[in-house]
Image (cartoon, rainbow, N blue to C red):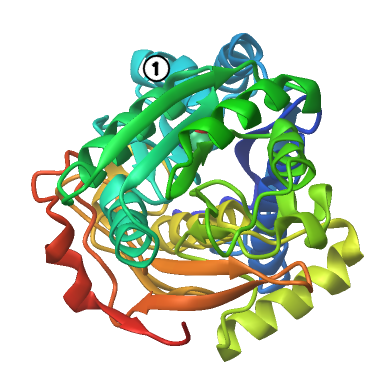
Amino acid sequence: MVTTVANKDPIRVGVLFSETGVTSTIGRSQLQGTLLAIEEVNEAGGIDGREVSPVVYDAKSDPAVYAAMAERLISHDRVNVIFGCYMSSSRKAVVPIVEKWNKLLFYPTLYEGFEFSNNLIYTGAAPNQNSVQMAEFMTSNFGARVYLIGSNYIYPYESNRIMGELVLQHKDSARLAERYVPLQAQDTEFRDIMKDIREKSPDFIFSTVVGDSTASLYRAYADAGFDPKKMPIASLTTSEAEVRQMGADVATGHFTSAPYFQSIESEVNRRCLERLRQRFGEDCVPNLCWESAYFQFHIYANAYRLSGNDNIGEIMPHILGSEYDAPQGRVRIDPSNHHTCLYPRIGRANSRGQFTIVREATRSVHPDPYLVTHSLGDWTASLSMIES
Ligand code: ACM
């Protein structure tokens, strides 16, 4: 008689975020979101009785380190799947490596769109799930004369281009300026820009500044004495984590468009935040990228249970079309483009360091990473005003 012995070896997965460097505040939260989900899976008995064992590397906010560590995870640690990356420059560095080895990257970050890889699952927002809603909200509440300012790399260039095009659909619109600062920019580098903003007097500022210099931008704005009620900053990346860095007083009144805010009042979100705090205390600041990092691991684990392994060819059919009750609502991986159906929301930063949700989609919005449809009016029907 032949008896088969069930494989009880741990399942090794790669986890690649920045624990140090300019984007480490978000990177650490993404790591904590991933580890929380892994612990939940392990506490519930693992995947088919096998413990999940994360191999974690610090990519130091440097695309070259991302590339080197991705190569190491695959060729040395023998993982089939990597959970990781924040900046689009780091994703662009890892994509050729997962494609070369035919492995899988789960990417939990909003980004500029216009990309597809058979070896990626994108669980952050595409521009039709954040930029379109932000453009509609800002132009209808403040006007369409925009000042664009970003960090010096691909996501800001592309995201500013998209915002500029969206805003120009509005009457009386203008792209008043497009300015870029280094990733390590300090308060002084924003002072000149504030002078220019005073001269040009936009209706709103669209910030694609990321990482530590986000706090410097908002502080320079506050020091210049500008009023967020009249000329706010709108962003897709300024989350609760950056707000904690800059201080709630500096952030209050500015807007962010994201599928997730800590303030979402749902049982799933409340319970998830409780578990996170039990595990990591107040060290972790949950935000949109934390949430994507959290739910994408559960999507992977559920797919693995169906496929029995994580070879890309076998697990992918179980990932595509799969759904999960995430803290933001029920999300779904779109089989046609590997992006995720998400819930656009607009939040206004408040004095508690949180976001008051002022608009939210009544249902999830299908990802359209190539912005095939992107007129401002197409999206208003899916949004309901909660509080003005
Ligand atoms: C980003 O670089 N995708 C925020």
Label 1 SS: helix
Q: Nearer the viewer, residue 329 or 11?
A: 329
Image position, residue 24 (x, y; %):
75, 35
Image quadrant assignment for residue 305: bottom left
The verdict on label 1 being within 8 Å of ligand 1 is no
Q: Residue at x 17, y 58 (%)?
A: 376
Q: Residue at x 22, y 56 (%)?
A: 334
Q: Is residue 239 above or below residue 14?
A: below
Q: Residue at x 57, y 80 (%)?
A: 264
Q: Is residue 62 above or below residue 295?
A: above
Residue type marked 1: Trp
**Neighbour class for label 1 at 10 Å: few (<14), some, many (≥20)?**
few
Image quadrant assignment for residue 95: top left
| Residue 6 in sight from this viewpoint | no
Q: Residue at x 64, y 57 (%)?
A: 227
Image position, residue 102 (x, y; %):
34, 23
Q: Nearer the viewer, residue 321 or 41?
A: 321
| Residue 286 in sight from this viewpoint | yes
